[in-house]
Amino acid sequence: MTKTLCLDFGNTRLKAAIFENDVFKEELALTDDSNESIEKLLAQQHPQKTILSSVINHNPGIEPILSGKSSFHKLSHLTKINFTTPVGKPESIGADRLALVAAAVHYYPGKNNLVVGLGSCITYNFINQYHQFLGGSISPGMEMRFKSMHEHTALLPLVQKEWNFPVIGYDTKTNLQSGVIAGITYEIGGFIDYYAGKYSNFNVVLTGGDSAYFAGQLKYRIFADLNFLFKGLYALSETNNH
């Protein structure tokens, strides 16, 4: 059995996942990216392979630790990938988007795939049936929308997400919830309409913490997969770690 540790350092959370051979086993939360935390994780899991996707300025000291105790790969524009990137600057593609695109090609080959990643930002990632990543869109995520309306106005409060809200809000709180949550729903639906009208053999994957909710609000058949980014990291680890 080969154990692979996939590390995903995002803007709000540091996460890890364990794969045994090609089977996703569990997700783990990291409190920080200190040398001690990474050494403790490696001592607990004993992975043969590790891969790191980071969109933050993480602690650089963990990389020699990971490479010293496993076959390690850091995701970057130099990573060997299972798709082509005919975009202006391939090196500008975020590590998280590379992983999502890799997962789409690995699990849904030969399709026109739109992968919607719901995180600090919402990313729309389009990969055509020839496995070319053509790009897409980036918009503010849910928490960013709530916070920006509060922080950039004098009187609007900071409200939290609640799924049971009216689309026609009746007070400030429900107006903000409708604007953010229903707004995201209509935004996702609008992008799907655009791609579905332009491409046949079309597939949509939603991933991120709230993907199950939004998938249920949309009229299309959508695959909601919380672990899709980790699955992409695992696929890239297999390509780059020998």
Image (cartoon, grey):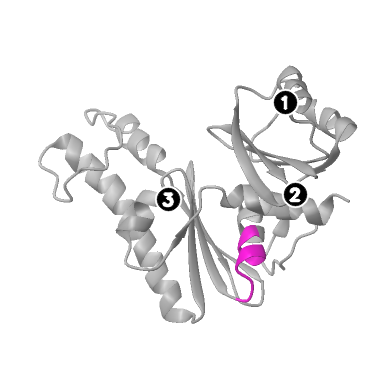
Label placed on residue 226: none
- Label 3, residues with CA under 10 Å away: few <14, some 14-19, many ≥20: many
From which residue to which does the magenta span run?
A: 103-110
Quarter of the rendering occupied by the N terminus = top right
Question: At which x and y percent is residue 70?
Answer: 85, 36
**Mark 1 or mark 3: which is in front?**
1
**Mark 2 or mark 3: which is in front?**
2
Residue beneath label 1, please?
Answer: 41
Q: Residue at x 35, y 66 (%)?
A: 190
Q: Amino acid at mark 3?
A: Ser
Residue beneath label 3, please?
Answer: 211
Say if 22 sits above or below 84 in the image: above
Residue beneath label 2, please?
Answer: 21
Question: At which x and y percent is residue 55?
Answer: 64, 40
Q: Quadrant of residue 133?
A: bottom right
Decide if residue 13 is in sight here: yes
Q: Main secondary structure of the magenta part?
A: helix
Question: At which x and y percent is residue 160?
Answer: 30, 32
